[in-house]
Image (tube, rainbow, N blue to C red):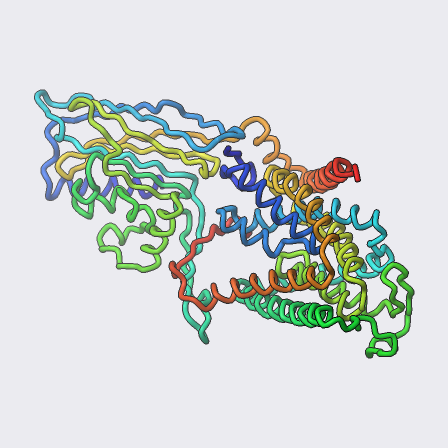
Amino acid sequence: MRRQGAIGFFAALLLGAGSLAPPAAAERLVTSVSTHRVLITSNFTGVELVLFGAIDEAPAGVQIGAYDVVVSVRGPARSFVTRHKQRVLGLWVNADSREFDKVPSYLAVMSNKPIAEIGPTELLRRYRIGLVYNVLPLTANDVAEAPPEDSFRAAFLRVKTNEGAYTADSKGVTFLTPRFFRAAVPIPGTAQTGDYQVETLLIAKGAMLAQQQTAIEVVKTGFEAVVAQEAKSHRFFYGLGVALLALTTGLIATLLFRYD
Amino acid sequence: MPIYLPIAELPVNIFLILGLGLAIGFISGMFGIGGGFLMTPLLILLGIPPAVAVASVPSHMAAASFSGAYSYGRKRLLDMGLGLVLLSGAMLGTASGVWFFALLRRAGQLDLFIALAYIILLSVVGALTTAESVRAIARAWRGTPPILRRPGTHAWFHGLPLKLRFRQSRIYVSAIPIMMIGFVAGFIGAVMGVGGGFLLVPALIYLMRVPTTVAVGTSLFLTLVTMLVATVLHAVENRTVDAMLALVLMTGGVFGAQFGARAGLAIRAEQLRLLLGLIIIAVGVRVAADLVNPPAELFSVVSKEIWE
């Protein structure tokens, strides 16, 4: 991810020097998330964090609408296999498949307006803005070439969106004043534990002005943490424990029903 | 009321899971089957990762079959000798099944094989059970005496050595065909991720001529032991046994099994067999429909890590 960021930065430098005029003011972005640590307890069903952001050193007299903000939350990277079913001898069976390596297990993209209106495709692709450009094997070539219309990638996004693992909200960022905004950051109940990267991008008229990165840690706590830990570190005794639990439960029910 | 599952890493409705455990436990106690072939697909349908569902269901089956086996045992409807001979075959079958499972997974067509195996087995076993019980019910209707036990007839396996007398089952046969039945049940169970009880009960009734109630009681005992072993094996091998999911499922399961065992003893044996046959056929038809009908979504996404 760091390397892709470097490629993007390098490309931005090239592009800034060449075609687009650099923005006049040097805006700075300051963000803060309501919590950096989400604790999973036995009644955890998800939580909504709030991110506040301020735009420093903005020129005087800016109005709401002068800036665009995109907040992307990326869950721990995982590898997935997408399988395509085809009809063989009247039966629907898995035929071809495609692997997606190290893509976010969770992805939420919040913006103040639809992603397509924020900037040109090159910008979206370079900074991985929006769902589509996050699930892309980004190579140096991809910065120059348009992504091929790929049915596997479209299907992957569709399935993940239906599962609720990937969401896009074009009204997720609200400007409270021209220089101050708020974004809702949803962490669902199905969230995997690990580090969630929260990236805030400040864009104006299709040009990148500033970026901010922060992280949220999702961890299990209390009983949930103990169970998850034991299942990993003492596999045999954990299994034995569950087996004994089954016997005990069976015995208790039997004794309760013994009145006849 | 939601409850967070620490290994599956998602919240579920506790009453939904409890109810599921109760319903499957009832069927389990009534027919002497583990109910895995019903429970595992239902949990996956609820969004639980397949690896967690397959690994956590055995502990529910162990708990449900314990209380069922105990009930049958107290009524002297559990043939321990028969159970132990079956068990020795089932252990060998399970080991071979685990090996075959790995072989299929490498070939990449595990899903298709499991679905086809389900359809063939469920429809054959379901059709045989249903047809036989319908004939038995028709005979009872006409008033002709049942001819379930035919002392004069001898199948090929009656000539085999190692003959043993199983008193509670009222049979005198060689240990070899019984071990073979255990082997097949264990093998199929390991490959398809089910207990194998739905094969065992009809095999004991129709091939070995064990009385229905003793077949059910003995099958429950076998399910108990194999599922306890499976729980430990899954915990060690796959690390996907969810203790919280297991606890909620088994709490529902043990009570369901108690009511199920009572219901099973209360209704007539041939009606019990007809019901079991119809349930097996219904599941088979469901699996077949999924394979034949065009799916709503042609693509599926699975996490690589959870299977590795």
Residue drawn at point x = 12 percent, y = 30 percent: A66
x and y percent of residue B62 in the render? Answer: 71, 47
x and y percent of residue A155 in the render? Answer: 35, 56
Return the residue nearer the eye: B243 or B220: B220
Residue drawn at point x = 40 percent, y = 46 percent: A163
Q: Quadrant of the C terminus of chain A?
A: top right
Q: Is residue A2 above or below residue B161?
A: above
Answer with the quarter of the image where residue B195 lies: bottom right
Decide if residue B268 is on the left or right side of residue B176.
Answer: left
Decide if residue B12 is on the left or right side of residue A160.
Answer: right
Return the residue nearer the eye: B211 or A152: B211
Is residue B96 among the parts visible in the rendering?
no
Answer with the quarter of the image where residue B139 lies: bottom right
Decide if residue A130 is on the left or right side of residue A57.
Answer: right
Return the residue nearer the eye: A120 or B137: B137
Q: Is residue A136 above or below residue A240?
A: below
- How many numbered marks have been drawn onto this rendered protein structure? 0
Answer with the quarter of the image where residue B189 lies: bottom right
Residue drawn at point x = 91 percent, y = 69 percent: B163
Residue drawn at point x = 74 percent, y = 67 percent: B203
Q: Quadrant of the N terminus of chain A?
A: top left
Q: Is residue B79 above or below residue A248?
A: below
x and y percent of residue A173 in the render? Answer: 24, 31
x and y percent of residue A104 in the render? Answer: 39, 43
Is residue A179 among the parts visible in the rendering?
yes
